[in-house]
Amino acid sequence: MQSVKEIKRKEYYIFSPFLRIFHWIMVVAILILFGTGLLITKPMFVASAEPYLTVTSVDLVRDIHFVAAFIFCAAFILRIYGFIINKGDRLFPRVWEGHFYEETVDVALHYMLLKPHHASFLRNPLARMSYAALYVLVAIEILTGFAMYFMTDPTGIGAALFGWVNTILGTEMMTHYVHHYVAWFIILFAIGHLYMVVRAEFMEGESEVSSMFSGKKILAHTPKDANELD
Amino acid sequence: MDKRKSLLDAYLERGFTRRSFLKGCVALTSLMGLSTDMLSKVVEAAETKPLPVVIWIHGHECTGCDESFIRSAAPLASDLVLTNIALEYDHLLSAACGAPFEAHLDETIQKYNGQYILAVEGAVTTKESGIYCMSGGHTFTHLLNKAAKGAAAIIAYGSCAAYGGIQAANPNPTGSAGIGNFVGGKPVVNVPGCPPIPEVMTGVVMHVALFGTIPPLDGDGRPKQFYGNRIHDTCYRRPFFDAGMFADNYDDKGSKAGWCLYKLGCRGPETYNSCGNLRWWQGMSYPIQSGAACIGCSNRNFWDEAPLSDRLPKYGKLGDADKIGVGLGVLTAAGVGAHAVASLIQRNQRDNLLEEEEHRD
């Protein structure tokens, strides 16, 4: 192996700062929400001299959960703004384009270790689909979360906006279950996502990891979806 | 029956003074969960409105709601039945029986068409044309249809009438369901609970009786004044929840000290009822106060949300969602680890191939 190579690469600016900030808010929020969520379902008990001194106060844990949830929801403003002003932020899977499916199969075969390469993409079709799936999961969490949160006042405006979720799921207990189960799927996504990003880095060395800080990818091949930035 | 008596007439007839009548109205006002501003309206209604005719029928159920109802202390169930309403037909409380009794039902329905209150306990059975619940030689569905047609208002007492109840639990062999879809589209006041709180039962029927309108309802058809809050939010053990002090078992220190029963599967956080503020038996106690976790008996489908003693369902040896989640997390981590190794091998092979090609060139 040579330690110094000369390879010609092109720099593509993809992710706006709004998407990047949103991404990292989301990372922190999901970790906090998941941890506090588990604690709300199964609170820890640490005895102390007086009840109000307990560090595991469920009240506090719930407040942290709620604040994190509100910040996460508010952060979607950044995501939406980035989506509007920057083409690179538009990550939805282009299922309406025929070549999307061939490319998906191509990438999937590579991930199944059946092909040594896959074509170069700014954002590959499988990754796009997984992000779409994540947003669906997050949407379920937001809807069920508010459906539980606002029902402290069943006649209030919050209950009017989100109460239908409980009706669709049948009971509020079911809403709790769905919220809890979907949280686990988000964590499974996160493990897979983290791995795939690091893998892309060591397989191709195309600055997959740093792109979420700098907004840029540096590619040796011309990506198939480069035209999307025009 | 010609001129129907009002509540005031009934009081005077029994030798009470107007003063005690007014006292009774004050008590009624607060029992119905109304503000004292409403007192003048209650008095006016009690003076002028004729006593409401009530038809009370029982479907697929255990009649436990009646057991609760007859224990109402304020108003006393006996006062309510004998003085405050004109109870014309009741499967359980009537002394009469047989053909004359059934004939009286038809008579009542005709005579007071459009005026009577229909109180229903018990579910409707839908399978096999409804033969699982028969009354007076007909299916209960038939009776319900007949009685609902001329009703001014319909009250569904108990979780069975409201949602189907225990007999609607999976696999629901009788096809039991709440009465809501079997009353010809008439609005139904849902008074769920297994059974409902006695004072809630009497309070709702008194509201309909005095004001001639159904009480304000929430989205699920339940009277807001009784089902407007979660038990969790009115529970006297809530401070223990907030502080993180829980009973982990029914025989541990926390349980004896009266701490929160959340970890034992208490459904208080998901259940809307007046147990926390009205309580049972003249405010003596309620399940949580007696040390038993709430099972959410006034909730739709509560019977299918086992285990009632835990926050999360368990799946046999796999455990609950958290255990399965950790397992899946470990599996995923192991999977990506293996994939990483395989990918590295693949990359090395690929690079070797490329190098060979370069040498050949």
Image: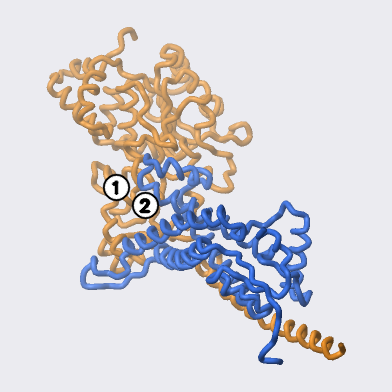
Chain colours: A blue, B orange
Q: Quadrant of residue B356?
A: bottom right
Q: Nearer the viewer, residue A38 or B266?
A: A38
Residue B62 higher or lower than B92, as above or below: below
Q: Badge 1: few (under 14), some or many (20 or more) residues near its Cα, within 10 Å?
A: many
Classify residue B70 as left or right of residue A191: left
Q: Is residue A177 among what the camera can see?
A: no
Sequence-first tag of 1 and 2: 2
Give coordinates of residue B100: x percent, y percent: 45, 17
Q: Nearer the viewer, residue A228 or A165?
A: A228
Q: Is residue A157 among what the camera can see?
A: yes
Residue at horizontal 84 percent and vertical 91 percent from the top:
B359
Q: Which residue is mark 2?
A: B268
Give coordinates of residue A195: x percent, y percent: 60, 74
The image's mark for residue B276 is 1
Residue at horizontal 53 percent and vertical 24 percent from the top:
B184
Circle 1/circle 2 CB separation < 8 Å? yes
Residue A74 higher or lower than B176, as above or below: below
Q: What amino acid type is highlighted by mark number 1?
A: Gly
Q: Which chain is disc 2 placed on?
A: B
Give coordinates of residue B62: x percent, y percent: 44, 39
Q: What amino acid type is highlighted by mark number 2?
A: Gly
Q: Nearer the viewer, residue B62 or B352?
A: B352
Q: Quadrant of residue B72?
A: top left
Could you tell me how far apart the alpha carbons at marks 1 and 2 are, in whole angstroms?
9 Å
